[in-house]
Amino acid sequence: MSGAGGRAELDPVTLQVVAGSFRALCEEMGAVLVRAAHSPNIKERRDASTALFDAAGEMVMQAEHIPVHLGAMPDAVAAVREHEQRAGDAWILNDPYRGGTHLPDITVVSPLFEGSSLIGFGASRAHHADVGGRTPGSMPARSTTLEEEGVVIPPTRIASGGRLDERLLRELTGRMRGSGQRQADLRAQLAANRVAAVRLATLVGRNGLELVLQGMEAVLDYAERRTRASIERIPDGAYGARDVLERTDGGDLTIAAVVTVHGDRVEVDFTGTDPQTPGNLNCPLSVTKSAVYYVLRVATDPDIPASAGAYRPVAVEAPAGCLVNAVAPAAVAGGNVETSSRIADVVTLALGQAIPMPAQGQGTMNNLTLGGGASGDEFTYYETLGGGQGACPDADGPSAVHVAMSNTLNTPVEALEQEFPLSVREHSLRRGSGGAGAHRGGDGLVREVQARTPMEYSLLTERRRIAPRGAAGGAPGKAGRNSIRRRDGRLDDLPSKAQGRLEAGEAVRIETPGGGGYGVSGV
């Protein structure tokens, strides 16, 4: 039946069944992608996301994968929708200024048809271990332009009428290190999108096209209603906060935000944020929106469906050319992973003036890339590392977990040592790094990886000078530390952003930050 204003309504039981079907479809897409991928970054760490969109490009459902992909994939589908769609097509893109995040995150979008009618899109996004550029892993610490970071792919049709363009696939991956593995991972993404087509067709065959389309609209509206109801419980007002990112020259980059709550709506304005930088901490607006949506999801009701309907009550404003709304051709490798984390911190700080919010977590993804090898036999290793989560008003923070914008796993030691010429010297809790308080912040971890052959390294990290803050009187967590262990055992400290060369027998050592504590001990 139809509700007021012509919007679709379903009875509560049918709505939950339909929403569950869409969620299962997205989860199965993710399972196929993980199982079919070849690179450890996808098959072990699960650095990927999958989603279902309606024909208008609104995200009906996303699997519970990577928060930083939350608000960015809809922009990728919007970029694809600018072109003509045909049954059997598939599109590929990674351009951060056309719906991407940073270049290693490649998105594959497939239009879904029922007969001659476009009824939706299946989309998968995965972080590829290399997409070309100056350094192995395509996450250079010192990049200043997008082209230095790898191959830039605008929305491009990679399959037509169900036939993959093998020449285009070889051409794109031929400009990346480990091209065979890149091809395999892209084929895994295409397979995941195929699952979306098959499962959506099954739902249509079982329930009829009208109910499926009505269900898509109903899920979007349901997420919107629940989000608005949750926002109404936040006191009206304008709440401002700011925090900084660490520049390699010792200076700071400021992110400022004012979060304004009006009834059942939220506006987040980043006016006052520093201009974009010559380095790579610049953030596309799509990533900024992802960080805002993540915090609102945490502050409202995490059980609300991961649907674009939940974004409808939220407006995000940022001046063009600022750090969180960069314009081309600014480098963005660190913006997606590090700046997004700080945006989440700032919005959390602002909302913490209105409602209880956790202390700051580690505030970084601790990005490490290693790579080398002869031409035609290159390897690239990429990993983000967990740390301490901030304590909550009623609980200690978890230790050694991926915090906020990341939701990946670590690479198991066995898989890492089998796949790469690397040895793990230490993988342990960084005990005592969490901040004290009535509830303690979580501890960070220590990861020391030794090179068995000469290779290059790159580190993109944060919170090495400025520790995560505590809340309500809690103590800050301990700042992180990066270093190189030389073959004689000596440790040489590195800045938060660094790149260089490891000789055989040398190791990169990363000690990740602890989370802030909450409340005063003994009170």
Image: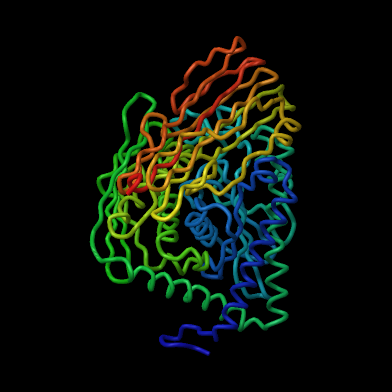
Residue drawn at point x = 73 percent, y = 43 percent = 38
Residue 359 pos. (x, y %): 38, 47
Residue drawn at point x = 73 percent, y = 36 percent = 415
Viewer-proximal residue among 83 and 195: 195
Viewer-proximal residue among 184 and 289: 289
Residue lying furthest front: 522
User: In the rendered image, which quarter is residue 355 located in?
Assistant: bottom left
Q: Is residue 59 left or right of residue 462?
A: right
Residue 501 pos. (x, y %): 58, 18
Q: How is the image coloured?
A: rainbow
Instruction: Specify whether residue 343 is in view.
Output: no
Residue drawn at point x = 70 percent, y = 56 percent = 31
Vertical placement of residue 141 versus 289, above or below: above
Residue 238 pos. (x, y %): 23, 59
Residue lying furthest bottom: 1
Instruction: Specify whether residue 308 is in view.
Output: yes
Vertical placement of residue 223 versus 331, above or below: below
Residue drawn at point x = 72 percent, y = 39 percent = 181
